[in-house]
Image (cartoon, rainbow, N blue to C red):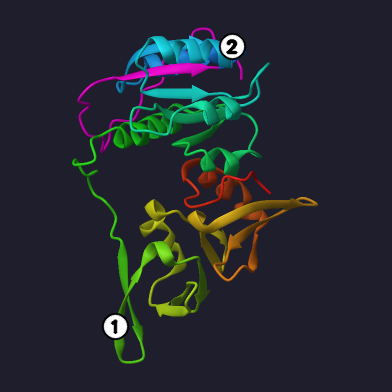
Amino acid sequence: MSAVPSGASRPEASRSGSAPQERALRVLVVDDEPPAVAQMQWLLEADPQVGEIHTASNAAQAKHQLDTRRIDVVLLDIHMPGPSGLALARELPGDDAAPQIIFVTADAAPAVEAFELAARDYLLKPVRAARLAEALRRASDALRPAAEPAPDSAPQRVSVLQGDTTVLLDIASIRWVQAQGDYARLHTAEGSYLLRIALSDLEEQWAEHGFVRVHRSSAVNLHHVRRVLHRQGRMSVQLRDPAGTEQEIAVSRRLMHHVRERLEVHRVRGAGRGGQG
């Protein structure tokens, strides 16, 4: 990542739609490259969500900081001398007192493994101010007490017609969606259902549930993705099937960058912790 440009104006973090902060976040930046640390400090100082900024250049320094001070969010590089950022994340406790992990790296390949480690977000360098602010907002929301619901939470079920019967379908159970004219066919482990909605509208409305458009005629629920495959410049996603079979869905070249960005944002829930494919 390039250093802070001389004479550059400090970025203005987006405040639209954000709830007032009860307390500012205490952030630890872990990166072995001084220019990357300086750039991140520069961005964080401009963000009203941030109160304290601490830094570490390797996993050992980061563990010392975490042992000696209260940290809310760790901005963690992956490739560093000594233990990697992924190795450090594996050592952190998985309880409510653990800090929120946001990986910050130039390498998109470990994204699935990072989300299997319960990362809150995954940012690709160079990091944009608005993208960082969004990641910090997600971390701040996750730090709220469980009794305090996040505002504007998305609906959890959708009603679909099956013959002359209305079925309430859990959105989380929908693995992928296929466009069929003015309808979308919703594929679950139990079967498929038709819903009258355009695929573009569905992706926008269900973004919080992890749905992303991968092709002009299909969208997938990232929570059901087992692997992201790259072969000869082409990309596809492999879905988990309770029956033990694996289904592969191609990602169009035009949407590859979009899918990578969405992989940064959404956790892959329920995936095994046995390493990435």
Compare residues 62 and 262 and report the one nearer the observer: 62
Q: Main secondary structure of the magenta part?
A: loop
Q: Residue furthest bottom?
A: 164
Is residue 4 visible in the rendered structure shown here? no
Is residue 71 visible in the rendered structure shown here? yes
Please report the bounds of the magenta region as a residue range. Answer: 1-30
Find residue 255 and report its horizontal and vertical position in percent. Answer: 60, 53
Q: What residue is rendered at 47% in x and 42% in y?
A: 265
Find residue 3 and report its horizontal and vertical position in percent. Answer: 58, 12
Q: What residue is rendered at 30% in x and 32% in y?
A: 143
Q: Amino acid at mark 2?
A: Pro
Q: Amino acid at mark 1?
A: Thr
Seen in the picture, residue 146 relative to 225 is either above or below; the reply is above
Seen in the picture, residue 30 relative to 86 is either above or below; the reply is above
Compare residues 126 and 209 and report the one nearer the observer: 209
Residues at marks 1 and 2 touching, judged by CB atoms closer than 8 Å: no
Seen in the picture, residue 79 relative to 244 is either above or below; the reply is above
State the image quarter where residue 130 is shown: top left
Q: Which mark is residue 206?
A: none
Q: What residue is rendered at 57% in x and 45% in y?
A: 273
Q: What residue is rendered at 37% in x and 11% in y?
A: 69
Q: Is residue 250 left or right of residue 242?
A: right
Label 2 crowd (10 A; few <14 / some 14-19 / many >=20): some
Which quadrant, please, contains the N terminus?
top right
Judging by the rendered image, the residue that carries numbered circle 1 is 166
Asked which secondary structure carries label 1, the reply is strand
Q: Which mark is residue 35?
A: 2
Give the mark nearest the N terminus, 1 or 2.
Answer: 2
Residue 23 belongs to the span the image colors magenta: yes
Q: Is residue 248 left or right of residue 20?
A: right
Asked which secondary structure carries label 2, the reply is helix
